Every structure is written in structure tokens, then in C-alpha cells.
Amino acid sequence: MKHRVVVVGAGFAGLQAVKDLKGANCQITLIDQRNHHLFQPLLYQVATTLLATSEIAWPIRRVLRNRSDVTTLLATVSGVDVALREVVIDDDRRIPFDTLIVASGARHAYFGNDRWEIDAPGLKTLEDATTIRRRLLLAFERAELTEDEAEREAQLTFAVIGAGPTGVELVGIIAELAQRVLPDEFRRIDTRKARIMLIEAGPRILPAFPEKLSTYAAATLATRGVDVRTGLPVTSVSAKGITLGEQPIAARTVIWAAGVQASPAARWLGAPADRAGRVLAGPQLTVPGDDAIFVLGDTAHVESKGAPVPGIAPAAKQQGKHAARVIRARLAGRAEPPPFRYSHMGNLATIGRNAAVIDFNGFTLKGRLAWWIWGIAHIYFLIGTRSRLAVALSWLWSFVSGHNSARLITQKETLRKLD
């Protein structure tokens, strides 16, 4: 019988591990609760009408169609029986394994205020993105309809909580939408008067970047009409708006970009975890005391060169590659590779049209050139020529015409009753 490898999660880490196990004389079962692999770094562009869902997501079965050694299951994992070496899925079905890779990702964390999710959705899935897009577009439509000036101002107030790359990139495109894309399409409102707020409890935005780049990003956003607030936490969120410190702010559209919480993998495995729920992984990315179980990506707390590995796509892909190398070495009876070492490729964030910031291990870049490099890098990491071409054409169309192509209000509200 071939060695049985079960992979939970078809994100960057899990899919990379599956790809690198090609020809390793094992039978792989890939389990995910969705049928697609998602390019999360561009998810915010779906939320803000720049890209369509099909441009950043690909059916898992299509990606692995030529891999007869891989069986893909659309299922939800509810637990792992470590003693019996089985993954438990829907209806208590059990999938046996000899080696297990858990790369089940993370969701947004509300720091004990989970009720806020209804009114301040985060951005981790296509469903999240289309919910946010719907709320953004409906806010402008409702502002056009209302006769109440206070309600109109509330509909035209957009608050993004959390000023990491996702938060900065979101407000950058919302500002473009209000300032450049929509003004000619409404008659009763001036979309350029929209109030777009970026809120960060810490002292500065983009805290993972050098301070000079944070300062540049804040100044650039300010010139584009974004109200950047730092140093005060959000203390409440409701359908009516937020409270910033002790100041109530009427905002009908609130987006959460402030933190993440790992999947329940630590509980499934009975493994030690950090405060965000990430399993404390060993040097080979395995669970302490069980070398047959790997934890990768946002599921894992990984240390490399004495520092935590960031939860970003390049890191997850490197972890997937390393896990596959270890498994291949074991199956071939070779010595295992050295412990995992993360190679940091740099931090990138776009602020909007012609503006981005890049930190390449101390070498920094900002402005238009950084924006072009950011775009090229993201197109490069997309899967397949068709997707690269589709995204490039969407960006080119938006740049030349000043219009965003994905602006249909279609599906119903998924979190709260708005209509």
C-alpha cells in the first residue's frame, strides 16, 4: 500500500505541498471546505469592484486535473483522531493517514467581540469579499435615495478598522471609487464628499514597514481624502456605526482588517498553541512529539532565525515546499533536510493608483515605480496564463478608462438583514 498523505486546506501552503509531492510514491487526499484555491492577496480588489471573483480563484480539481495520485474531497473537517491516525469529516466519515498536513488557515479575530462580525465583516473568503462589495455599492445607492442629510452622511461614511496592508489597500481603492470612478454616475449626491476612515489602535499605519514608509503611506492617503486615525481603539461596532475611543461615528459600512484567529487545528490535534490559536510548530514544521503531523501557513506559529514567520503567502508556500521535502526524504530513506528557514522576500503594499510601498529587507521603495513592481509581482504569482492575462487586462482597463468592471450588486446579504 502506498504511503497515505492527507492534506487539510488548499491554500498556499497546502496546495504547494501537494504540488511538490508529485512523483513521491504516495497517495494524497486533499480536503477543503471550498472547491477553489483563492489568491488572497488580491481579495480586497474583489471587495472594492476592481476584479471579478473568477480572476483570483481557481477550481481545485482543475488545478490538479493531471494528478492521478491526488483525490480531492469537498468536505469540512471536524476533528483529528491522532491515536487512530484518522481525519474526521462531514457525517463522522473518517479518512486514514500515515502523514497529515494541516494547513487550514485562519479567520478574522475580533478580540473577544465576535458579535461585531455581523456589522464589520472581515476579508478572508470570496463570500466576505462579495458581502463587502455589496455593502459598499448599496451605501452609495442608499445615499442617493434618502432625503435625510444625516442618514446620507452616514451612508457615505466608510470605516476600515486595522491599518496593515489589507486595511491600507482597501481604503486606497474605496477612495478611488468615490473620487474617480463614481462621481459622474450619481445625480443627487457628490460621491467625492464620502468620508473614508482608516482606523489603527497602534501609533502608526503599516507597522510591519519602516516608519518612513508608514509616514509616506499616511500622507498619500490623506491627499486622497482618507481620514487616517491612529492611537485610539474602536470600542463598539453596530449597524449604525462605531465608537472610536469615546466618540460615536455614524458609518453604515464598516470593514474589519485588524486581526486573525487560526482554525481549530490546535484543538483537533491536542497541540500547544499561541494566543492566536496557531499550533506551535517544531523545527521541521511538525507538531511537537508527533513527526507525522505537519502544521503550515496561518495554522502554525513558526520560528525562523529567532523570529516568528509572518502569515503571508510567500511564507506559506515556502513551508509547503519544506514539508514536501521532508516527506520525500522520509519515503526515500534519506536524511531529512535541515530545519525550516524562512527566506523573507520583502513586504509590499499598494496605496492606490501610482502609489505603493516596498521593503526589500531594508531596501525601500515608494511611489509609482513601487506600484508597478507591486503589480508585476502579484501577476507573477497568479495561477495560469489566463488568470494573469485577465487581471492585467482588468487593471489596464481601469487605469485607462477610469472605470471598475466588477460593480454588479447580485447576491443577497449573508450576515445581516439590510434589504
Image (tube, helix red, strand yellow):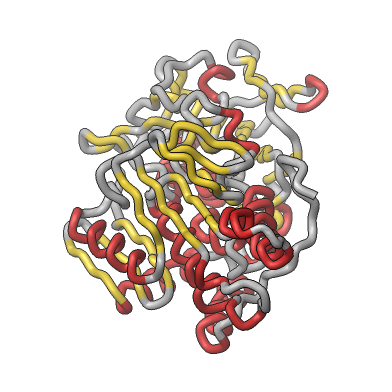
Q: Position of residue 197 (x, y in %)?
A: 44, 54
- Is residue 65 in view? no
How many marks are shown on the rendered structure?
0
Q: From the viewer's perspective, is residue 231 above or below residue 214?
A: above
- Is residue 255 in view? yes
Q: What residue is rendered at 73% in x and 48% in y?
A: 35
Q: Position of residue 278 (x, y in %)?
A: 45, 27
Q: Residue 82 lies in what quarter of the image? A: top right
Q: Residue 54 lies in what quarter of the image? A: bottom right
Q: From the viewer's perspective, is residue 164 above or below residue 184?
A: above
Nearer to us in this view, 248 or 176: 248
Q: Position of residue 344 (x, y in %)?
A: 29, 51
Q: From the viewer's perspective, is residue 372 above or below residue 17?
A: below
Q: Position of residue 267 (x, y in %)?
A: 55, 17
Q: From the viewer's perspective, is residue 145 above or below residue 85?
A: below
Left or right: residue 76 versus residue 337 is right
Nearer to us in this view, 151 or 419: 151
- Looking at this view, name the residue that lies furthest to the bottom: 400
Nearer to us in this view, 397 or 111: 111
Left or right: residue 366 versus residue 248 is left
Q: What residue is rendered at 52% in x and 78% in y?
A: 180
Q: Residue 309 lies in what quarter of the image? A: top left
Q: What residue is rendered at 75% in x and 35% in y?
A: 75
Left or right: residue 203 versus residue 281 is left
Q: Quadrant of the N terminus?
A: top right
